[in-house]
Amino acid sequence: MSKYQTNISDVARVGRRGLLQASGGLVIAFSLFGANSATAASAASDTASTSVTPPPAGRLYAWLAVHPDNTVTLFTGKVETGTGVQTALAQFAAEELDFPIERLNVVMGTTSETVDQGPSYGSRTVRYAGPQIRHAAAAGRQALLDLAAAHFGVSANQLATNGGTISVIGAPDQTITYGKLVDGKRLNMEIGASGERFNMVVAPAVQTKDPSTYTVVGKSVPRKDIPGKMTGQFTYVQDVRVPGMLHGRVVRPYGVGSTLLSVDETGLKDIPGFVQVVRRDNFLGVVAETEWGAIQAAAKLGSTLNPSGPDAAPAKWSNWDGLPPMDQIWETVRHTAAGKNAAAANRGSVDMALGYASRTLKATYKTPFQMHGSIGPSCAIADVQGDRATFWSCTQMPHQTLRDMSKMLGMPLEKMELRWFEGAGAYGRNGFDHVVADAAVMSQAVGRPVRVQWMRWDEHGWEPKGPPIVQDLLGALDSNGQVIAWRHHMWIPTTSDTHLIAAALIGEPDVTGQTGLGQPAVVYKYNFPNADVACHGEGRVALLTAWLRSPAQFETTFAMESFIDELAAAAGQDPLAFRLAHVSDPRGIDVLRAAAQEYRWESRPATGKRPQANSKPAHGRGVAWVNRDDARVATIADVTVDPASGEIKVGRVVVAHDCGLVVNPDGLRNQVEGNVIQSLSRTLREEVTFDRAHVTSRDWQGYPILRFSEIPDRIDVVLVNNTPKYPSYGAGEPSTNPTAAAIGNAVFDAIGVRLRQTPFRPDRVKSAMS
Amino acid sequence: MIILTGEFAMPQSIALNINGSSQTVDVEPHSMLLYALRDNLGLHGPKFGCGLAECGACTVVLDGNAIRSCMTPVSAVGNSKIVTLEGLGTIENPHRLQKAFIEEQAAQCGYCINGMIMAASALLDQKPHPSRDDIKQALDGNLCRCGTHMRIVRAIERAAGQGA
C-alpha cells in the first residue's frame, strides 16, 4: 500500500474531528487554510507575513483548494500565453475531480502558490502538465471520498461523486458538497510526487479514469479567460499597479555592443514627475512618478536612437559597428566555425549513390532573423527591498525567472516571489523575462517598486530574435524517378540563449543564462536509401537569439518540404503521391491523406509554367507536412500570384492535424488557425532589418506583419487520430511548420518559380521571375 | 518615431467625458489620452501597443470614430464623448459585439481585442450591415499577432447579423 493510500485510510479511521485535533505529526490531513489559498493571489497583498516558497508537490493542497462555497481552485506552475492551456488544464482537473468546470478556477505561475512544472513552452503544457494535474485531481477525488466515508460512516466504495457532490449510493438524502465536506480547510494529504518539472510524477498510485468515459476532456469548453478579456475586466500584467510604484523606461545602447560614455541630465528635472536616472555600467534607465514622465525622459536621453549617431543625444554611446552587413548574414552563419556538428539522419552513402543518379539537384535555402512581435511590449514590476524581492511578471517560466533573479541580485530564493499575470502573446522567449531584470535593476536603485514597460522600439530592437538559417540540399533521382540520395546540411545559430540583457549591461553577463547551440531542428521521416541530414549548431551570431515558435523547425521544414517538391517536379510526379511513396510513418501518411481528402486533391504534377510579366494572375496549390514532437501536420494551400505585382494571395488553407487525443477541439482549431496566419505572416512579410550598429526594424512599418486584407479566404482544419489510443501531444506550434513550404510549392505550381528565401515579398517574386 | 514634445507643461485638471460621465484627470495637456485612461482612470480596455498609432491596441471611440488614444493628446479631446471597451458592456451585460466575440471564442491572448471591438463598434454604428470586405478594411490598421483574424471577422459578422 502506498504512502498516499495509507494516509487516506488514516483519514477514514480517525475521522474528521480527530484529524482536526491532531497536530505535530508528520501527516496531518487538514490544517487551517493557509498561505497558499486562492485569495492570496491578489496583486498587492503584503508578503512579509506569509511564506513565499513554493508548496510541496507531494501535498494535495499544492494542486487543489476546495472552498466553502463549493468552488475549487486548481494551482499550476504552468501559465497561459494565449493558447488556451488554462482551460485545457482545468478540463483535466474537472474531469478527474468530477467537478463542474464553471466552478473551477485556475491560479497559474505565482511561485509562492504553485509547483514548478517547467516552463510553458515547446507545445509541452498539455502533454506533460496534463497528466500531472490529472493524477493530482484523481487523488483529490479519492481524498474527498475518504473524507465522505468518515462523514457518513460508510465505506468509500458505497459513495459516488457527481458534479461536486458526494452521495451514499442508494440514499440520495445523504449528499454533501465538496465545499461542506472540506469546510474551508487546507487539503494537506500526502499524495506523493517525485522527479522535477516536465518529468515530475504526481500521485503515481492513484487510479485515473478510463479515457473512454471522459465527459469534459474532449469537449469544446469555452475558454475561461475570454469574457474578461472582451470587456476590459481582465488584469494583464500591464494593468497591475502596486502602491508606491514608480514608472521606469529603459534607454538601450545605440549600438548592440556600445558602451555608455556620458549622460547629460540637463533638462530632465523640467519633466513633470521625473525622479531619477538609473545608471549602472552600460545599463541606463529613467524612473518617474508618471508613465508619461518616464517616456519623455527616456526619449530625451535618446531612447529612440538619434539618426545623427551614437553621440548626438544627451546619453552618449561609443561608436560600435560590429554587426555583419545584412546581405552577408547567411555567409556569416555559414562561416561561423565555432559550434558543433550533429547528425539527424545518416543512412547508406550519399556520395556513392550519386554515381547511380540520373538526375541530381542542388539548392540553398535562406531564412532571416524574425521576431516574436508581441502586440503588448514587455512589462514587469519589481519591488526589491533590502533582502527580499517581489516581481509581477508574465514570463512563460516563472520559477526559472525567479531563480535567475536570485542569481542576478545575489538574494536567497526563499525571500523572493514572482506573482504571475498574463501578458500579450509571446510565441517563445521574447522580452518578457528581460524586462523583469530591467525592473529589478531600477527598483534596487531607487528602493521603490518600479514598473517597466518597453516601448515599441525597445521591443522590436532588443527582444531575442529567431536566428537566420542557411541550408544546403542535394537530392538524386534514379531513372524511375525514385529518390536514391538526400543530403540536408543546415547551419543554425542558437535558439536557446538565455543570457539576460540587463545582466550584460550591468557588467555581469554570465551571472545567469546559457548561450546554447543551434540544434538539428528536423524530424527526418523519409525513407530514402541514402541520407545525410546534419546540422552545424552555433552559438550567438550577430544578435541575441532564443526560441521563436517552433524554433528553427519552421525554417528546416521550409527547406526540406520545398526541396522534396523540387525533386517531385524534376521527376514529373504529383507532389503528394511522391511524398507518400517515400514515407512509411503511418501517422504522417494519415495526415497527408486526410488533408488531400478534405482539399479534394487531384493527382497531377506541378504545372510550373512561367507566365509573361503582364499575364493574368495564376493559381497554384502546394502541400507540405511535418513531424513535430510526435504531432503530425499536413498543410495544403491555394495561392494566386499576380505576375505583374509579384503579390501572393492565399486562398484556401487545409490543415490535417494529429496531436493525439484532443482536449478541447475548438481551442485546438483556434490554435491551428493562429499558427497558420502567423506562419503565413512569417512566410510572406517578416524580416528583421539591421545596419552595422543595431536593428533598424524598430516599429510595425519596419517589420510589417499580415493584415486583415491579406488573410486567407478560408482555413479548414481536420482533426486526425483524435482518439484515446494516443496521448495528448502538444499543439501550440506544430501547425506553424509546413506553411512556408506549402506556399512556396503553390507558387511554383502557379508560376514555375521556386522561392528559396523567406519572406516571399513581391519584389523577390518578381526578381525570381525575371 | 518622434514622440518627444520638447515642451514640458505642469499637470492641469482636465475634464473628460468618458463612457457617459464626466471625469477629471490631472495630467499634462499634451500627454496622450491613453495614459490618462489607464493610469489616472484605471481603465484596462485600451492597451499600450506601440505608442505610434500603428497597431490599434489603444483604440477608443471618440464622437463615433475609432481613434488611437496613444497619439491623441488629452488637450485635443475637449468636450468630445469617449467610449472605451468598458463603456460597451460587462461580462454580465455584454454589448452585442462582446457577446459575439465570446460566442465565436475570437481571442487567443486577447491583447489586441480591445482595438478590434472598438473599431468594429464604430464600423457598425456607421454601417450596420457591412460586407466581409468592409470589415477587413475597417480593421486593416489593427494588428493581431496570435492570428485570430478569421474568428474576429466571424464575430463581427455575427454581431452585425444580430443588429438592425
Image: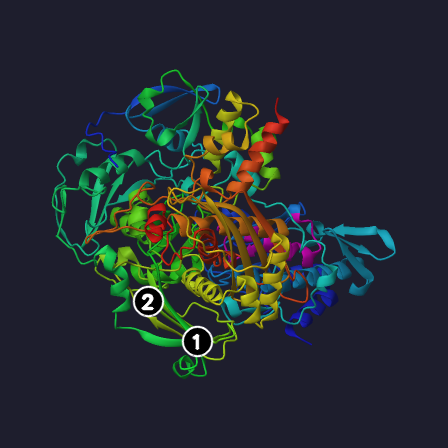
Q: Is residue A68 among the parts visible in the rendering?
A: no
Q: Secondary structure at mark 1?
A: loop
Q: Is residue A12 left or right of residue A765?
A: right
Instruction: For the N terminus of chain A, give its image quadrant.
Output: bottom right
| Residue A19 location (% of width, % of height) | 67, 62
Mark 1 vs mark 2: give the one in front: 1
| Residue B36 location (% of width, % of height) | 36, 29
Q: Which residues are magenta?
A: A75-101
Q: Secondary structure at mark 2?
A: loop
**Residue A303 counted in the magenta span:** no
The amino acid at mark 1 is Ser
Q: Is residue B153 among the parts visible in the rendering?
A: yes
For the point 57% across and 54% down, the residue is: A655
Residue furthest to the right: A170
- Protein chain holding label 1: A
Graded by Cα atoms within 10 Å as few (under 14), some (14 to 19) or many (20 or more), the crowding at tag 1 reads: few
Q: Is residue A714 left or right of residue A342?
A: right
For the point 49% across and 65% down, the residue is: A568
- Check disc 1 and report the residue beneath it: A358
Q: Nearer the viewer, residue B112 or A326?
A: A326
